[in-house]
Amino acid sequence: MIAAIGEAVICRPKEAILAFVTDLEQYKRADWKIGKVLECRRDGDVFFMRHDGKLRGIPGPAVSLEMRVEGNTRARYRAVPTFPSRLVLTFDGGFELTDMDDGVHVVHTENFRFHVPFRWIAEPYLRAWMSNDIREEMARMKQILEAEG
C-alpha cells in the first residue's frame, strides 16, 4: 500500500474548500493526477465521480469513486470497483478540515492499493513520488483558493 499525506493552512472558509474538492473540473487544477472528468453526479452529500488520469506520467484506466461530505469538517472518498480499474488498484482518502486562528488546516490523505502483479512495479516506482505529489498538490490548492478569495 502507498499512503500519502499533505497538509496546508488555507485562508478561505471551509465551505469554499469543500466546494473546490467536490468539483473535479476545478480540483484537477491542483491535482494533476486527474485527467478528463467523465462523470460527476451529486445526491445530497454524496458525489459519484469518474475520471481518467495518470500516475507519475503513466496513463491508467478510468477510475470511479464515491465521495461523502460530512458537515463542513470532512470529505471522504473511496474507489467504486469498475472494469478495468478494479483489476489494477483500489484507493481511498479524504480531507479533514479544522479551524485555526490563521485559516483552515486541511489534511489530505491518499491510500493506493495495487493488486498483484501491478503492486510489484507500481509501489516501488510510485511511493516517493506520491508523497511529494500530495504535498505539491496541497500547495497548489492553497495558492488557487487564496487567489480566488
Image: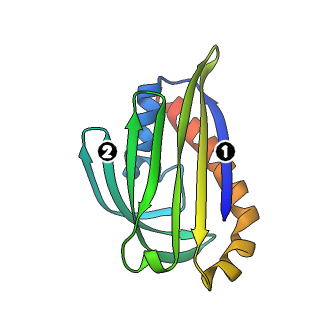
Of helix, strand and loop, which one carries label 1?
A: strand
Residue at position x 62%, y 86% from top?
A: 117
Would you name the residue on which mark 1 appears? 6
The label on residue 16 is none
The residue located at (66%, 38%) in the rendering is 7
Residue 19 visible (yes or no): no
Up-down relation of residue 12 to residue 131 (above or below): above
Question: In the image, is 135 to the left or to the right of 37?
Answer: right
Q: Position of residue 106 (x, y in %)?
A: 59, 34
The answer to whether residue 104 is above or below residue 53 is above
> Which amino acid lies under the numbered mark 2 shown in the image of this protein?
Val
Mark 1 surroundings within 10 Å by alpha-carbon count, few (fewer than 14), some (14 through 19), many (20 or more): some
Residue at the disc numbered 2: 46
On-image quarter of the N terminus? bottom right
**Residue 72 image offset from top left, x and y in percent:** 43, 27
SS class, disc 2:
strand
With 48 as the anchor, is 26 left or right in this view? right
81 and 105: which is toward the camera: 81
Q: Of all residues shown, which one is farthest toward the bottom?
A: 117
